[in-house]
Image (cartoon, rainbow, N blue to C red):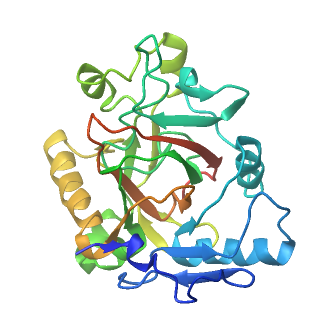
Amino acid sequence: MSAVLSSVVAAPYGDAPPQGLVIRSIEGAAGPLGAEVLGLDLSRPLGREDFARIHRAHLDHHVLVFRDQRITPAQHVDFSRRFGPLQIHVLKGFQLAGHPEILIVSNIKDGAGQPIGLGDAGHYWHSDLSYKDKPSLGSLLHAQELPGEGGDTLFADQHAAYDALPEALKARIAPLQAEHSYLAKYEELRARSPWRPKLTQAQIDEVAPSIHPVVRTHPETGRKALFVSEHFTTRIVGLSEDESQALLAELFAASVRPEFTYRHQWQPHDLVFWDNRSVTHLAAGTPDSERRKLYRTTIEGDVPF
């Protein structure tokens, strides 16, 4: 059963906030996946020592939840940039005005009935921007408006998923590469979604498919992780269509076993920062009657190896 991040909402320190930066693991989570960051205000300057602790915790826990962050879009962008250059999403119509680095993730429509953001983001398990030659290092998602029900996000630890594979399967996939394509499920989603626009040829060219290892090595920790996802991975290079689809189905199932996941239930002003080199994630869905809006930045990573 997946751990629920909100299970540790009740603070052990009573009504008083923690003094200084506190990073704690999620109660009940399997392994190190996920940690809360408390006693930190990202609207104020962040010193080198605290930044180093956050960086270390991000590598150790893969998903960090910064509680009650009342930050501006500019502060969101500035904090994200401390980890590396930011990537601009291909759906530029859903950029936040004045902040092209921020993608609006929302099911809200404006007065003219037009969507203000990408409302079906995360419909399938995926790692953000895995279809790029340099996929995302990490993503930071900041809650702006939350639904009364639904809207949860699930994360799956791809290091744990890889470690649990049978040795024979590890040996089989070690030399393999896979194709990742933004277009893999785009038209399928567009056919049933009011949020996805028809792509121009320039946008299609911008998201040309990339080839990456099926098993990637984390460039900072050296740990191996599965690097395939239901949303963007289309085929295993060098295998027949039947062999490719059979192997991918096996790996997709292995990558999201419940014991490797937890479910984040959003609270107002949460900022969640996850490592796309270590986890995949999934949006659990929001009822049509509920409103949801979040701001997302993505940090450029390295070429997977």
- Any part of residue 215 in sight: no
Q: Name the residue rendered at 56%, 68% in the picture.
A: 64
- Any part of residue 297 in sight: yes
Which of 123/98 is in front? 98
Query: In this rendering, would 25 be left or right of 75?
Result: left
Q: Quadrant of residue 232?
A: top left
Q: Position of residue 150 (x, y in %)?
A: 30, 51
Which of 133/54 is in front? 54
Quadrant location of the C terminus in the rendered image: bottom right
Up-down relation of residue 109 to residue 260 (above or below): above
The furthest residue to the bottom: 13
Up-down relation of residue 107 to residue 194 (above or below): below
Query: In this rendering, would 255 be left or right of 155?
Result: left
Q: Name the residue rendered at 37%, 28% in the picture.
A: 183
Q: Position of residue 57 (x, y in %)?
A: 62, 77
Which of 63/109 is in front? 109
Up-down relation of residue 256 to residue 105 (above or below): below
Q: Name the residue rendered at 43%, 68% in the picture.
A: 225
Which of 152/261 is in front? 152
Query: In this rendering, would 161 be left or right of 137?
Result: left
Q: Name the residue rendered at 74%, 55% in the picture.
A: 79
Up-down relation of residue 165 to residue 196 (above or below): below
Quadrant location of the N terminus in the rendered image: bottom left
Labels in figure, total: 0
Q: Position of residue 223 (x, y in %)?
A: 51, 75
Q: Position of residue 66 (x, y in %)?
A: 60, 66
